[in-house]
Every structure is written in C-alpha cells, then in structure tokens.
Amino acid sequence: MTKVEPKFRDMKKFLVFFSILTVGIFLLSFTMVRVITGKVTDKSGNPLPGVVVKAFPSETNDSVVTRADGSYMIETGDKAKKLVFTFMKRVVVEEVIGNRTIIDVTIPKEPVATSRKDVMMMEAQSMPAVVVGYGVSKSTMPINRYNGNFNTEGYASVNENGFRAVSANPLSTFSIDVDNASYSNIRRFINNGQLPPPDAVRIEEMINYFRYSYPEPSGEYPFSLYTELSTCPWNRDHQLLHLGLRAKDIDKSSLPPANLVFLIDVSGSMNSPNKLPLLKSAFALLVNELRSNDRVAIVVYAGAAGLVLESTPGNRKGEILEAINNLEAGGSTAGGEGLKLAYHEAEKSFIDGGNNRIILATDGDFNVGESSNGGMERLVEEKRSLGVYMTVLGFGMGNIKDDKMEIIADKGNGNYSYIDNLQEARKVLVSEFGGTLFTIAKDVKFQVEFNPAKVKSYRLVGYENRILNEEDFNDDTKDAGEMGAGHNVTALYEIVPAGSDEDIPSIDPLKYQKSTEKTKNDYSGEYLTVKIRYKTPDTEISKLMEKSVKGYVMDPAEASDNLKFAAAVAEFGMLLRNSEFAGSSTFDNAASLARSSRGFDEDGFRSELIRLINTARDMKLTSNREDQLE
C-alpha cells in the first residue's frame, strides 16, 4: 500500500472544499435576489406616492410603498413573475417582470377618496412601521396622498349679533379676541380664486389683523383705551362706536426667558407644500429670534407621539434647526397624545416667571385618540392652570379644522393664527414675536353700559363666540381672552341713537315686576361707559379700568384713519358673509374707505386688503352673472 504524503492529503481537502463552495455559488445563482426599481405616475405625469408594490408569486411577505416622488425599489426572488400595484386596497396595474429591472408604471385613474373612511384607509396603507415623522430619509419615507377634491375643512357656525334695546339690555359684555386667523384664511381663499364660506368669516379677527394708531399706555394700567364716535358709513341713520385697546410694548431683549415646546403635526395630511414645508420655514424664522436663555423642545405626533428634541438652549440653533429639517409627514393623527406629551415636556422644563408656552402647528385634522372638540377643550382647560400657555398656528387647505384650533387656543390661554405664506409667518413669529409669545394680561373682559338718553339700541360687530353673561364680568373664575405685549384689540358697535323712530327689538310687559321708566339722568352728556377687567399673568384677582365716552359724533369724512379703516374691514366682512346688517355697503365703498385711510403702510398689508376687496368684488360679479345665465 502506497503511503500518501501529508501535503497531498491537504491538497485533497482543499479541492473538496473548493468544489462544495463552487456548487453552492452555482446553486445560489439560481435563487439570486433581483432588485427592481421604477416610478409610478398618473396619466398627467405627476408622481403617485402611497402606492403598494408587491411581487407575485412572492417568496416573502414584504412589500414596498412608493415614495413622495413616486419611486420605489423592491427585491424579488427568481420565482416572481409579475408586480402588482395597489392603491386604497384596489389592484390598479399588473406588470410582467420578465427580464426587466426597471419598471415604470402609469396608473390611468387614481382612486378618489369619497369619505373619511377612504382617507383613513389611504393613510393606513401608506403608514410606515417606524415612528412616523422624524429621522426617516426622504428617499425611503412613504407619504400619504390626500385627494385635493376631498374637502373636510371645519368651521364653527357664526350667528351674527343683532340689535339690542338699551331699555332692556343696557350692558354688553364680551371677552377680548386677539386671534387673527380668519383674515389670513380668507386671503388664502380669495388668492386661490374662491370666496370663503360665511362661517370662515369672523369680522372681529379681520379687524384685529391690522394695527391701529392708539396712544401709548401710561400710568398704572398695562394698556390704553381709545374711543371714537362717528356716523356709520353703511347706514347714515346710525352711529359707529370705535373702541381700541393697546398693550404696552416690551423690547425683545427685556422679555423673560422662554420655555417653548414646539408641538408639530407630521401626519399624512401635512404632506403638502403649504403645510409641513412652510411650517419648517416658519419655525426657522422663530428659531433665529431665540436667545441663549430661551429653551426649546420638539414633540411630533402622527400615528404616535414622540420627543425628537429634548429641551435645548436657544443659542444652539444648529441642533434645533436640524431637528426641524428632519421632519417628514406620514401616518394618522394622534393629536391628543401629542398634547399630553407636550405638556409633560413643558412642565419638566418649567421656568418660574418665564414664558412657558406650547406652540402647536397643525392643520387641525385630529382623527386618532382624544379628538373631539369637547375632549380637546377639557384637556387644555385642565392644564392651563399650570401656567403653560398655548399658541396655535394653522397651516394648509382642504382639511383644515379651524373650529378645533380656535377652541384649543382660546381654552389654552393663548392665540390662534393661520399661516398661508412665509410673509405671514414673519409677521406672527418675528414682527409680533412679543405679542404672540408673551402675555401681559389675562382674562381681559369688556363691559359697555349704554346711556338710554343717548342710545336707543346697539349691535356689537363680530365677537359672536366671545359674548359673556353680564354677571361673568365680575366673576374672576370665568375665562376670557389674553393680551400680549404690543397687541391691539379693536371693537365696533353700530348704534341707533335715542329719538330714532326705528323699530327695535322689544319684550312683552313683565307680569311679576314692573318695568322702570327711563328718565333723564345726570349723565346726559355721556353716551356710554366702558369698563375693563383684567388679571396680571401671575394673579387670579382681577383689576378694573373704567372710562366714560362723551362728545361729538363726527361725519365719516372727519373721522380718524383708525375708525375709517376698521369700518372698511367690517364692511368687507359683512359683504363676504352676506350679512343682513350690511346696509348700503358695497365692495367699491369698502375699497374707497380703506384707500382713504390707508396711512403709513410699511409692510403693505393695508394695500393688500384693498386688492382683496377688489378681487372679491370681481368674483361676486362673475358669480352673479353665471347665476343669471342659469
């Protein structure tokens, strides 16, 4: 028997191993994974995100979803014969794979969402299995597609204030309102070629969008009170009372340190250029205003709520901006959970004597978790006593929930603005930074007592959702509006003067008590008395400010630019609402009145109003002609 040398024995082992390896590679080549890429578009060439792509027969349960640009990449086994493209759980296209590695698809007709259930189905289908909204690459992030024809915008109903007889109702009581969301939202509608729905028109918010030349506050009160009387421009038999409140200005450098929590909606409904991308640009403007003693945390919410940035000093702007830039949209909307987490973070970093505030940025489309108006209201009311206030910024169109956002801001001791462009973001978050983010007075209430010797009846223009009972004025437990540094608040009353033969609302004679006959009094020169109650931010006991109004009723041509411009805005609002109280108002009259009182207009906002009035006039004329042709 021949003896085998050790070196030949080793060579034999090597050859056996090499043969096994070669066979393995050869066999593996028959089951090699293929990578197929492509893009899904509609018949107009627009990308379709949110389309599910799956291989059949499948050797795996994996599937992919097209990205924001409609692209996809899928790995398939050698047994896969076709790709199936599904949208809203409907098979829309099947493509044979063959030898192709690039498969582009045109879907001839996109399924249209016809109900909220369909929208949520689209959401669920494209929702990734990750914490949505942060830290996901743009190239891999599946994003929902909300059909633009499906409009779910929500507005609270507005029933206009009517005239009230002074003999039966001498007191008018209301909470101040410094929100201005309605005006910028109306602007969005008109700029997009539509007239706004009547309930989107809140005239007091339109008026309060603009600043007026009220005197600087002096003395013990944190604001000044301005009053003026004129003949009413839209009804010369009536008079117009203009009330203006101006809060003291505070230099930005003197503002107390801010503990801010950005609560950002990154749900699928925010996937639109005028939503999340605009939101990022808006917050970048605010971040540039932060000081080293300010702090910012960022909470996002979509299918779940999460903390993406712990409380960070304001001088670390790079970190804050990076966290904002990494946000992406996708998933459903757990707004209630987001609010709870934001309050938790605000409490954790609370600054005594500071500006502790949540800034909620959303389209208001809450559909997961605590989402009812009542539920949101209770949640925010429960937390506001902690000293954490709320600013709400609305974005977008098509499904904006204006009614919910207004409730959250009002009940959260804060204010509500609608951001329709970057200029508006700069106005709210830079130019009006102090007023938006720092409260100098809370629970501010007006009560006006009319003198029957001068006034027969009156009507408060706007403020329909801010009306209070007479007894609420002295009740310090009743919530009212907040006023920020440098803010203006303006209110208009349309007055029927005493002695007018105009019919006014009346009541039947009382059975159990006699009505007292109004007689001349020692205040015959006074038209009315204005009383204001307010609290400083750190107290729960209100203070009283009071002023009587007497004097000359001017002709509109003699009135100040303050009164004329506010009246022009009111006329515009009444025309948009098709108000029964519009009197002789016309778009041309409103534009002329605004033009004559434009005054100094550094940012062009007053000139823009005139353009909007003229555009709305043309739209109304076109609409009326079309109605006549029908």
Image: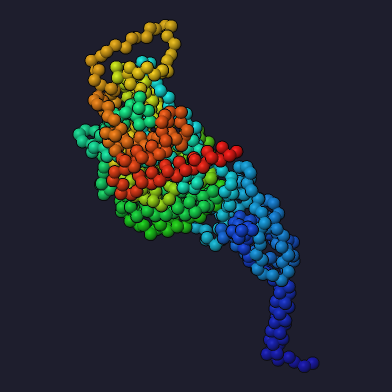
Relative to residue 135, is residue 174 drawn left or right?
left
In the rendered view, tell whether residue 426 sits above or below residue 460: below
Q: Residue furthest bottom?
A: 2
Tell me if residue 459 can be seen.
yes
Q: Position of residue 314 (x, y in %)?
A: 34, 53
* Colouring style: rainbow
Relative to residue 285, is residue 402 drawn left or right?
right
Q: Position of residue 397 (x, y in %)?
A: 51, 46
Q: Position of residue 581 (x, y in %)?
A: 43, 28
Tell me if residue 408 can be seen.
no
| Residue name at image x 72 percent, y 60 percent | 94
| Residue name at image x 39 percent, y 54 percent | 284
Q: Residue furthest right?
A: 1
Where residue 187 sits, quadrant-wise, is top left
- Considering depth in this image, is 333 or 129 the residue closer to the camera? 333
Relative to residue 71, is residue 22 drawn left or right?
right
Relative to residue 229, is residue 128 drawn left or right?
right
- Considering depth in this image, is 589 or 334 the residue closer to the camera? 589
Count every numbered label the image shows and give the total.
Answer: 0
| Residue name at image x 43 percent, y 40 percent | 182
| Residue name at image x 46 percent, y 28 percent | 580
In the rendered view, tell whether residue 94 sits above or below residue 425: below
Q: Residue furthest left?
A: 219
Quadrant showing the N terminus: bottom right
Q: Position of residue 174 (x, y in %)?
A: 37, 28
Quadrant showing the C terminus: top right
